[in-house]
Image: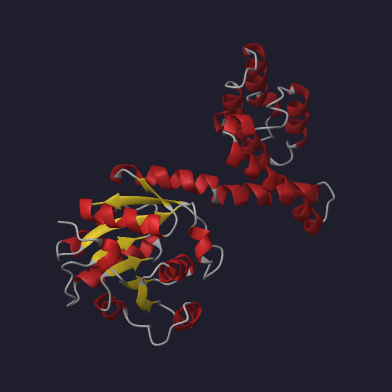
Amino acid sequence: MVRNAEQEIKSVAIIGAGRAGTSLGLALEKKGFLIRAISCRRKNSALESQAILGKKKIIFQPEEAVEKAELIFLSVPDDQLGRLVNRLSHSRVAWRGKFVFHLSGLIDSEILKPLEKKGAITGSFHPIQSFPVKGMPPSHWQDIFIGIEGGRRALALAKKISLRLGARPLSVKKNKKPLYHAACSLASNHLVALFSLAISLLRESGVKEKEALAALRPLVSGTCRNLVSVDPARALTGPVARADVETVRRHLEVLKPYPRASIIYRQLGLEAVRLVEKTGLSSSEVKALKRLLQDKRLLPRGLSRTCL
């Protein structure tokens, strides 16, 4: 029988109290959980997290930390997770009845199998949110989605914790986690990279970097607001949405000296065309845009059409 997790599971340990882990700790504390232990590889980082959490003497080695809690979150980089699990599985910790979640978006709960064999209830708990600094406020978790995956008991608790934080649980298939994570990275990390590329092009046009940042931020913010209220097809604006073939042609011409930007513009342009096919553009307009975006005569020198 699944026990009432909200009433009985209170004590928490966070292994890897970095930006996401510390922010999670703050949010859990506000909702009545007790952060009993944290662990970090670097002492200075651990001390910083301890101060942000407003605690004293909660820094321990991983084996000691997990002994002090019923609910354990492993918030370490993906390439360290396997080694950490192996280390913990060889400790003398009594795992039976402990809930263990890792925060990786890429890796499924199978990596926690050594702890499950020792009696732990295991799963993954991935916030679909970015954490630019340590100790983001609990409101940062409000209305976000949390990708959850694992066994029946782990999922039951993960759903309750998500809702308690003001977030929404999103069940993810174990064998689809890499694809799920790629989608999240494309929407977040690659958006930042695209923004940086746009700044670089503005600098090439003669705009100072500080002014470029100031000019593009409202544009990006407005686009994000559009995406909150309407679907992507209706949020899309600009020359592709208008089937302005001549503007797209001029863009491709001026981007020829910038191969990386040219390829990205073309690839995203083709995706934009796929979107506008849903909004009523004529088949001839769609064909003209696709033909232009795949026109090898407008490719930067040295690039093959196979890049498209």
How many marks the image carries: the answer is: 0
Give the x, y percent position of residue 61.
32, 81
Q: Name the residue rendered at 83%, 51% in the picture.
A: 207
Q: 249 or 223, which is in the foreground?
A: 223
Give the x, y percent position of residue 285.
67, 16
Give the x, y percent position of residue 54.
47, 81
Give the x, y percent position of residue 140.
52, 60
Q: Name the residue rendered at 65%, 32% in the picture.
A: 236
Q: Is residue 284 visible?
A: yes
The image quadrant that residue 277 belongs to is top right
Q: 218 or 81, which is in the foreground?
A: 218
Q: Is residue 266 above or below residue 14?
A: above
In the picture provided, is 266 more to the left or to the right than 158?
A: right
Q: 165 or 18, which is in the foreground?
A: 165
Q: Is residue 304 visible?
A: no
Q: Is residue 23 above or below residue 268?
A: below
